[in-house]
Structures are given as C-alpha cells and as structure tokens.
Image (cartoon, rainbow, N blue to C red):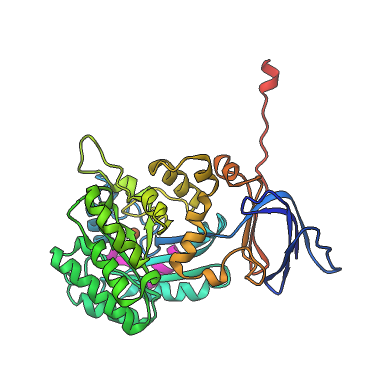
C-alpha cells in the first residue's frame, strides 16, 4: 500500500508512506508505487497514530438504566447501582456488551484500549469474559485489562486473594481504589500490597486514585512512593487523581517533586470527572479534574480516557475520543492555539505511554502501519470541525473507511 501526499502529525510538508507486510517501510516525498501497490491519494490529508483510550470500564458498559438510572449523578450511587447489576452478570452478557463497545470505539479510530475490570466478585465472571474478548479482538484492537477492586481490597471480603487470582489469570495491570477503602490507612496499605503483587507477577499498576473532591485524600503520594521505590515508575499510572484539584498549592509544590522522581503516568477522564465531580458543592462548584495543565507543564505524562460508556457512572458516551478531548481542553483551560494544535497527543502518544506500547506505536519507518487519516490540514481543524476520518488503518489493512456525509444547503435561494 502506498499513501500519497499526507501531513504527518501537523507537518507542513507532504510525505508519502509506503507500507509493506503490515509495517511502514518508507516515509519520503514522491515515492513511486510498484505494480501491485494499492495507492491512496491523501491530497494533503492529516495522518496521526491511532487513538488510544487508556481508561474505560468494559464490564459495566451499555448497562445504563439497568436496574435503575443514576439520577443523583454521584460516584457512590454509581457504585451502589453497579453492585446490584453485578448480581446478574454472566459471561455472555459481559462478552457481548464489551465487544459492542469496542466495535463502537474502533469505528471512531481507536486501536488501543485499556479496560478496568471489577474483580470484587468471588467468581471473577467479568474478568473471564474479558480475557476471551482480549484474545478475540486482537487483530483489530489491542486490549489491556486491569484488575480493578471496585469495592476495595482491604475493605472487601477476600479482596487480596481476588487480586492475586486476577493476576494469575493473566491481567496486564493491577488496580486499586484507596479513596474508597474504609480508612486512609487501608488505602495506603492497599497500594503497597498492589506494589508487591505487581513486582511478584511482573505487571503494571493502574490505580483509581483519589477520585473524590476531598483535599485530604492523599493516595497519590503513596502510589508515587511505591512507583519510585520499586522502580516500576513509568509502568505505574494514577487514574483520576481528582482530589489534586482540591489540594492546596503548598502541598502540590512539595508533591510535584515526588511525582517527577516517580515519573508515573496520569489519566484524566474529563467527561466523567466533570459529570461526577463537584456534586457535593453548592457554589463555587469545582470542576472535579486533576491538574492536567500543571502536570503536563512539569513534564509528567498525562493522557485522557473515556472511562464510561453508558453505565451507572455516566449516562452517555459513544466511544469517540474527540468528545473526551474537546471537553478536556475546555475543562482544563488548555486552549491556546498551540495547545489545541498539539492536543491530539492526549488521546494518542500519551495514552500509548500509559499502556507501555510505545515501541510499536507511532508514524515512523519500521513501526506497524497503524494510522488514521483525516480530511483536514492539521489537528486544530480536525478537532474543531470534527473532520471526516477517512481511514483507520491497522497493520496495513483498512479497518474503517468513511466518506463525508452528503449535505444539501439551500441558503442561497433566500438571498
Ligand atoms: Fe474509572
């Protein structure tokens, strides 16, 4: 396959991309096709690497309203409703809903997804289904699974054993939920437990950490300490960290040094954090997001995730990372022109670093031919105009092809 005349990641000059055996063989201007090359005319289109969602919950997806809608919109009502819905989980139920959500995501250009899976279930039903989903979708989606203790590790019966069982079954990463544990001490202990388990089984860590508007919620400092002291560092991700939006600046100043030493990743989930956050405030009402702009400026890796697609924690969601990014840039006030122009990294490269797949990710010679092509000159236009995604290509094969929907306008007749 030969892709002609595209702008790679906002570059001004046009390049051709030659693909052979599923990998990018050459990037250069004016490459001549050989006889059997399929030629795609880019005509100046934008090419970027595929979208990454490093944080979603595929076990609960597509369950919104069952058994009831989360009318209060709080995290804790979400956990209560999910606890009821969980009683009727079956392998087929999870397999079918998760696959449906992944297809939706793939249709919007996603090729890398990390899903948390609730393991506070003695039978680990959802995990068993998702392990099979991970295998079955592999040709078109790289899926990672995180053992997520939704109802706690120390605060749930046999929580530690369930985490270890999940590790043995083959998850990619271990989660935690320190802000939900009965006590701060349990929260800190749960993180250290996960650190030990991750080392024992050679796994990454991705903790739901301080997802609460409580400035006293300080699981992050323990998570960062574990990341630093174990040397796991970039294999560790702090998801949400919304309490950081409520910390005082003096504490954040001190914390930032540790975060930089630990070099761990952050995932912010703007849709869900804005929806669930600030629910106990009157006014001023907090945004509920972590300090994305400041973490990014400090050189820490921050990615955006979608978190929930139609489940007890979020009534909407369509698997489109453009919605996530659009709201994220507004909520974090990262809307300088250059910030918008480069903002695709929050849903591409930065997510790839969270998932630790960077070696096989990006538009470069020798890498797998995974890319998206948009009918736009640059990312600013692609995002602002919701430009048509003409192709999603994976290992040199077209996964998604899309033409702009035709639209007829009759304005001129009124002049
Ligand atoms: Fe989450």
Question: Quadrant location of residue 88?
Answer: bottom left
Please state the total of marks drawn on the protein image: 0
Q: Quadrant of residue 194?
A: bottom left
Horizontal side of residue 58 vs 341, given as left or right = left
Residue 7 vs residue 281, the one in the foreground: 7
401, 255: nearer the viewer: 255
* Above/below status of 24 relative to 212: below
Front-lying residue, 26 or 413: 26
Question: Could you say where residue 338 lies in the image, as x and y percent from the top left?
Answer: 53, 44
Front position in the image: 74 or 287: 287
The residue at 24%/45% (across/down) is 72
Q: Is residue 173 above or below residue 343?
A: below
- Main SS of the magenta part reads helix
Instruction: Name the image quarter holding the C terminus.
Output: top right
**Relative horizontal placement of residue 136, taking residue 18 as reference (left or right):** left
Displayed-image quarter of ligand 1: bottom left
For residue 204, what is the image quadrant? bottom left
Query: Which residues, given as a range, are shown in magenta?
Result: 86-98
């Amino acid at each position: 396959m030969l892709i002609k005349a595209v702008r790679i990641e906002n570059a001004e000059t046009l390049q051709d991309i030659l693909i052979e055996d599923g990998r990018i063989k050459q990037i250069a201007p004016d490459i001549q096709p050989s006889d059997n090359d399929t030629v795609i005319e880019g005509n100046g289109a934008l090419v970027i690497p595929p979208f990454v969602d490093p944080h979603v919950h595929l076990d609960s997806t597509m369950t919104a309203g069952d058994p009831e809608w989360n009318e209060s919109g709080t995290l804790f009502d979400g956990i209560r409703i999910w606890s009821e819905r969980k009683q009727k989980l079956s392998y087929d139920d999870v397999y079918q809903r998760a696959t449906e959500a992944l297809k939706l995501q793939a249709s919007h250009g996603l090729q890398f997804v990390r899903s948390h899976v609730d393991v506070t279930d003695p039978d680990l039903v959802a995990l068993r289904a998702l392990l099979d989903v991970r295998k079955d979708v592999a040709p078109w989606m790289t899926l990672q699974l995180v053992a997520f203790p939704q109802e706690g590790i120390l605060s749930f019966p046999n929580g530690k054993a369930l985490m270890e069982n999940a590790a043995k079954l083959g998850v990619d990463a271990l989660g935690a939920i320190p802000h939900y544990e009965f006590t701060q001490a349990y929260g800190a202990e749960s993180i250290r437990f996960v650190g030990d388990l991750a080392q024992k089984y050679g796994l990454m860590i991705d903790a739901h950490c301080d997802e609460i508007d409580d400035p006293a919620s300080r699981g992050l400092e323990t998570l960062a300490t574990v990341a630093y002291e174990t040397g796991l560092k970039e294999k560790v991700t702090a998801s949400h960290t919304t309490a950081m939006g409520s910390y005082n600046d003096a504490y954040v100043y001190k914390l930032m040094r540790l975060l930089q030493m630990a070099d761990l990743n952050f995932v912010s989930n703007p849709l869900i954090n804005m929806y669930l956050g600030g629910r106990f405030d009157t006014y001023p009402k907090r945004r509920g997001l972590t300090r994305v702009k400041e973490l990014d400026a400090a050189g820490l890796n921050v990615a955006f995730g979608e978190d929930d697609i139609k489940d007890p924690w979020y009534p909407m969601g369509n698997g489109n990372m453009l919605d996530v990014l659009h709201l994220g840039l507004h909520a974090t006030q990262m809307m300088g022109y250059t910030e918008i122009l480069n903002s695709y990294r929050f849903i591409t490269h930065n997510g790839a670093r969270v998932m630790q797949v960077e070696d096989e990710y990006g538009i470069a010679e020798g890498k797998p031919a995974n890319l998206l092509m948009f009918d736009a000159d640059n990312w600013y236009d692609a995002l602002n105009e919701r430009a048509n995604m003409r192709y999603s290509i994976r290992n040199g094969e077209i996964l998604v092809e899309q033409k702009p929907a035709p639209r007829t306008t009759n304005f001129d007749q009124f002049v």
